[in-house]
Image: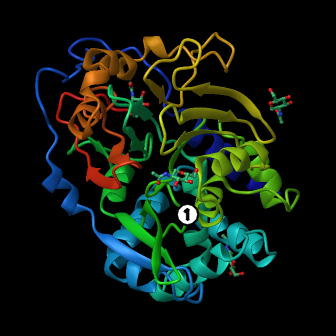
């Protein structure tokens, strides 16, 4: 029991120190590239491979062909975590995590079909099931930042984009001046066509070995990205580990579930409002019609707050990161202070396009050393592209 608490104390430290607003001395001034440089190059999106996952296939078989070519890269992610968890000398935290996670799984605490899918992947990789399951939960608990929905000036098209950030405080590599975890995650970034009945149902981006959807879009219907909150509800995770939260959903599995069960913005909005989650999150939802862009701030039980396009103070875009302003109510969203927001305003509504939004998301510090990839989507144009990111030095560490 004592050991368990020790482990959670370590997790808590690892997860809560991340992604806070930090003041940096020069030369670390924000640098908005709008009007200076156009880093967008569509061909770079070809680096991220596409796979088909057939939702009609048996759950254990669905992912085998996807993870097979990534075996070494996924095991490399495990290595980074295993090394990080040597943080307390003499206590085999990484092994213990495997044991208690496998325990939870055996008690049926991971819902189907995700459980069978994870088991099938562990079988294919020949890796430890507890560690693989932990990795799936770990993605749930960690931070991913900046999402944007923007409408074009002619009111015809919507773009939805996000930077996925991950790996703060996990093994700084002194030689290359990068985060080992962020770097290892770039190598497992993949796109997936989820098919049902022989047809495409939705497109998503994920990390090989993870069976949820991190960013997803149903062509001509709706798009979704989820940003974690700065303070994860770790007490809830502990309660879950102890078997006391039998009926809650993991948000990232929920994202996938949503695309398997909804085919409209309205349905998705409704479901996001109603579900009980293990942790709070920001859901950034886009639709196929003018004005259908919204940020829903969820705690475990309710929608706490919602910001929509063209609503009140909001304008032709909504932008959400995952840090809150210190000293303020956690719900106080002072985005005007955000460099990403300022860069969007510098671009203006006439600049809303793939290259315009990519330029904003490639500007420092919205782009920083934890940025794993950038996703660009347009529901109305059926575009879904993923770009591996690299932040040129000097660059913010997170
Ligand atoms: C994990 O479980 C295995 C098998 O039950 C056991 O042999 C091992 O000692 C456990 N490891 C730790 C660190 O508790
Ligand atoms: C937009 O989505 C709605 C469902 O919300 C659907 O009925 C409609 O056909 C879609 N429009 C287009 C142009 O696909
Ligand atoms: C979630 O937010 C709602 C609305 O602000 C509030 O009434 C509720 O108590 C919150 N729930 C938790 C678990 O904090
Ligand atoms: C690093 O990037 C993320 C995602 O774009 C952003 O939320 C975070 O605020 C950035 N860091 C800084 C110091 O701005």
Side of 258 where 53 appears, left or right: left
Residue at 58%, 87% (x, y): give it.
60
Residue at figure coordinates x 14%, y 37% from the top left? 39
Q: Quadrant of residue 344?
A: top left
Residue 35 found in image quarter: top left
Q: Which residue is mark 1?
A: 212
Q: Does the rendering let one see residue 215?
A: no
Measured as percent of width and height from the top left, residue 300 is found at 77, 42
For the question of whether residue 107 can be seen, the reply is: yes
> Of helix, strand and loop, which one carries label 1?
loop
**Ligand 1 shown in quarter:** bottom right
Neighbours of disc 1 within 10 Å: few (<14), some (14-19), many (20+): many
Residue located at (32% from left, 25% from top)? 153
Point out residue 361 in the picture as x, y percentages from the top left corner. 30, 33
- Residue 380 to residue 248: above or below: above
- Check the image and report above or below for 53 versus 123: above
Quick check: 100 above or below 220?
below
Residue at image point 57% right, 15% down: 325
């Amino acid at each position: 029991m004592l050991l368990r608490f020790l482990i959670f104390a370590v997790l808590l430290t690892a997860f809560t120190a991340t992604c806070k607003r930090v003041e940096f001395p020069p030369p670390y001034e924000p640098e908005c590239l709008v009007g200076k440089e156009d880093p967008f190059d569509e061909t770079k999106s070809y680096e991220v491979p596409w796979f088909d996952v057939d939702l009609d296939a048996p759950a254990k078989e669905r992912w085998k062909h996807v993870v097979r070519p990534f075996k070494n890269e996924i095991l490399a992610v495990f290595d980074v975590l295993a090394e990080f968890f040597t943080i307390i000398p003499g206590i085999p935290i990484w092994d213990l995590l495997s044991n208690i996670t496998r325990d939870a799984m055996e008690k049926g605490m991971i819902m189907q079909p995700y459980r069978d899918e994870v088991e099938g992947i562990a079988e294919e990789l020949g890796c430890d099931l507890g560690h693989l399951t932990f990795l799936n939960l770990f993605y749930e608990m960690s931070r991913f930042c900046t999402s944007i929905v923007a409408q074009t000036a002619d009111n015809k098209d919507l773009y939805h984009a996000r930077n996925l950030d991950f790996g703060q405080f996990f093994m700084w590599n002194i030689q290359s001046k990068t985060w080992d975890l962020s770097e290892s995650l770039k190598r497992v970034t993949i796109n997936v066509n989820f098919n049902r009945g022989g047809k495409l149902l939705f497109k998503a981006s994920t990390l090989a070995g993870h069976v949820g959807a991190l960013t997803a879009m149903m062509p001509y219907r709706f798009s979704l990205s989820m940003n974690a909150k700065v303070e994860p509800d770790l007490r809830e995770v502990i309660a879950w580990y102890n078997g006391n939260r039998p009926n809650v959903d993991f948000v990232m599995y929920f994202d996938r579930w949503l695309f398997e069960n909804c085919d409209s913005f309205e349905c998705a909005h409704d479901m996001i409002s109603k579900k009980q989650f293990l942790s709070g999150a920001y859901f950034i939802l886009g639709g196929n019609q003018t004005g259908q862009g919204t940020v829903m701030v969820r705690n475990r039980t309710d929608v706490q707050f919602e910001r929509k396009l063209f609503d009140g103070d909001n304008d032709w875009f909504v932008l959400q990161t995952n840090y809150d302003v210190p000293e303020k109510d956690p719900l106080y969203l002072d985005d005007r202070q955000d460099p990403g927001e300022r860069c969007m305003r510098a671009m203006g509504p006439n600049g809303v396009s793939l290259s315009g939004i990519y330029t904003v998301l490639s500007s420092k510090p919205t782009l920083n050393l934890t940025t794993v990839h950038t996703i660009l989507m347009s529901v109305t144009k059926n575009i879904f592209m993923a770009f591996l990111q690299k932040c040129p030095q000097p660059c913010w560490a997170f």
